[in-house]
């Protein structure tokens, strides 16, 4: 079936606008808009209709064109305007309105790129399926594809920004059924490292154990088990700097609440959600965070990254270095302690999920490596200071305590009496 015959079949269903007629041939004659294709098809049909009318005195094709073609109306000397398109219900008459409304909503937002998407109503989807049933889809494109492009071009002209199909700063979704739209502003992601200089602060917000975060007398109706967290100490200045609605914190692992995070710091990404601003002086932001945290937490090496960095942090099993203060149930000689530590160095450790976390983690046996474990100092009071470098995921407290046999080998098991970690500091996280 040739293009004129296809066009006639579409017209049999009712008046059709230039866009919807031309869209059925979108993959033909590049360099034309669908509107131009539709106009060309209607002109060709009007010429054919006029030929038939003059040679056969048959004006049926021209009359079929009258509701949607000025050419046909002029030929038959009929007054009138184009009637509503049966396919799109005249959506293409609203392109400028959409663009104006969206451009106004974008005022005040900092962005470089955007992308338009369209949610098509059920009726329009049904109409398009009827159109395809008549015309086929060999050369066609979807209604929403053309709407996205045409509205996008008009917005770009108004706001002087570029369309980005890969990673736009803002996605604009048009809802044709409600004539409303939604702006989805891409988050800003900032990578850095944090140091935790006081004990008793979790990495992220910890819901109250009694009320599960709802608020009760036990937590002072805050819903929090601990009133501060690394996440929350960083959050305020980030929200303010980017005028964001909220933040999300993504860390490369986490230290225990009673542990310090020292040395080079722990890598993290903070996500600023729905930001009004997308740029800021990260040096000044780090200074503001550190001032607000009043010595409890310090951030450094802040830089902008893409979302993929979160997956890198989460998927990498970072090696870690710890400084431990260890106490013993019985006196231990330096010679024996060093011998036991040497026996652990370079070994694979089998750890059944520790009792202290088994309520929130699957009870499995995991194997992790100790790269090195050395004695820094054995004090006169019997306390030992030990450095451990190990594979990420190793439970270091249990490496020392043995966790009643759930970790093997362990320092306790090798000594033959109980050893416990009194203080634990993380001094390096390698990714």
Image: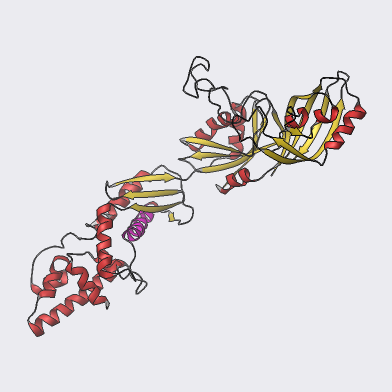
Residue sticking out furthest to the right? 335
Instruction: Give the residue furthest to the top.
Output: 217
Residue 273: x and y in percent read 48, 39
Picture coordinates of residue 360 (x, y %)? 59, 31
As for residue 151 lying within the magenta part, the answer is yes
Name the spot of residue 58 as percent of width and height, x first.
8, 79
Left or right of 76 in this view: 298: right
**Magenta region: which residues?**
143-158
Residue toward you, 12 or 394: 394
Q: Splitting the image into 4 quarters, where does residue 282 fall?
A: top right
**Up-down: is 346 above or below 216?**
below
The quarter of the rendered structure image containing the N terminus is bottom left
Residue 108 covered by magenta stretch: no
Q: Which residue is drawn at 50% across and 14% down?
A: 217
Q: Is the magenta stretch mostly helix, strand or loop?
A: helix
Residue 363 visible? The answer is: yes
Name above or below for residue 112 compared with residue 73. Answer: above
Q: Quadrant of residue 104?
A: top left
Q: How many labels does the image show?
A: 0
Task: Residue 94: name its quadrant.
Answer: bottom left
| Residue lying at 72% horizontally and 41% vertically, measured from the top left | 367
Q: Where is the C terminus found, in terms of image quarters? A: top right
Classify 69 as above or below 181: below
Is 211 placed left or right of 180 in the picture? right
| Left or right, 281 with reference to 155 | right
């Amino acid at each position: 079936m040739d293009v004129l015959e296809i066009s006639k079949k579409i017209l049999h269903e009712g008046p059709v606008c230039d866009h919807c007629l031309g869209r059925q041939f979108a993959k033909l004659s590049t360099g034309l808009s669908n509107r131009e294709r539709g106009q060309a098809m209607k002109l060709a049909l009007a010429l054919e209709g006029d030929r038939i009318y003059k040679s056969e005195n048959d004006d049926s094709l021209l009359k079929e064109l009258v509701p949607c073609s000025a050419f046909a109306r002029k030929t038959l000397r009929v007054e009138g305007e184009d009637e509503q398109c049966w396919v799109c219900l005249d959506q293409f008459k609203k392109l400028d309105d959409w663009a104006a409304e969206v451009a106004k909503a974008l005022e005040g937002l900092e962005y470089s790129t955007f992308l338009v998407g369209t949610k098509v109503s059920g009726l329009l989807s049904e109409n398009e399926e009827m159109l395809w049933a008549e015309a086929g889809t060999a050369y066609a494109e979807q209604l929403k594809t053309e709407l996205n492009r045409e509205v996008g071009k008009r917005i770009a002209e108004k706001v002087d920004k570029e369309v980005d199909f890969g990673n736009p700063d803002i996605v604009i979704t048009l809802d044709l059924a409600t004539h409303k739209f939604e702006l989805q502003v891409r988050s800003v992601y900032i990578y850095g490292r944090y140091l935790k200089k006081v004990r008793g602060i979790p990495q992220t917000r910890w819901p109250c154990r009694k009320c599960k975060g709802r608020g009760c007398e036990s937590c002072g109706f805050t819903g929090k088990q601990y009133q501060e967290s690394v996440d929350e100490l960083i959050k305020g200045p980030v929200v303010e700097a980017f005028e964001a609605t909220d933040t999300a914190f993504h860390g490369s692992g986490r230290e225990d609440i009673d542990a310090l995070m020292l040395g080079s710091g722990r890598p993290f990404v903070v996500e600023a959600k729905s930001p009004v601003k997308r740029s800021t002086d990260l040096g000044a932001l780090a200074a503001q965070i550190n001032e607000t945290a009043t010595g409890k937490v310090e951030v450094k090496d802040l830089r902008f990254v893409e979302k993929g960095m979160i997956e890198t942090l989460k998927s990498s099993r970072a090696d870690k270095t710890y400084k431990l203060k260890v106490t013993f149930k019985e006196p231990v000689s330096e010679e024996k302690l060093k011998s036991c530590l040497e026996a652990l160095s370079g070994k694979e450790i089998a750890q059944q999920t520790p009792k202290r976390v088994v309520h929130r983690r699957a009870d499995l046996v995991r194997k992790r490596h100790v790269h090195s474990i050395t004695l820094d100092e054995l004090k006169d009071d019997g306390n030992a200071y030990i450095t451990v470098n190990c594979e990420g995921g190793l439970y270091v407290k249990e490496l020392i305590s043995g966790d009643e046999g759930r970790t093997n080998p362990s320092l306790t098991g090798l000594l033959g009496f109980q050893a416990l970690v009194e203080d634990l500091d993380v001094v390096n996280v390698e990714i």
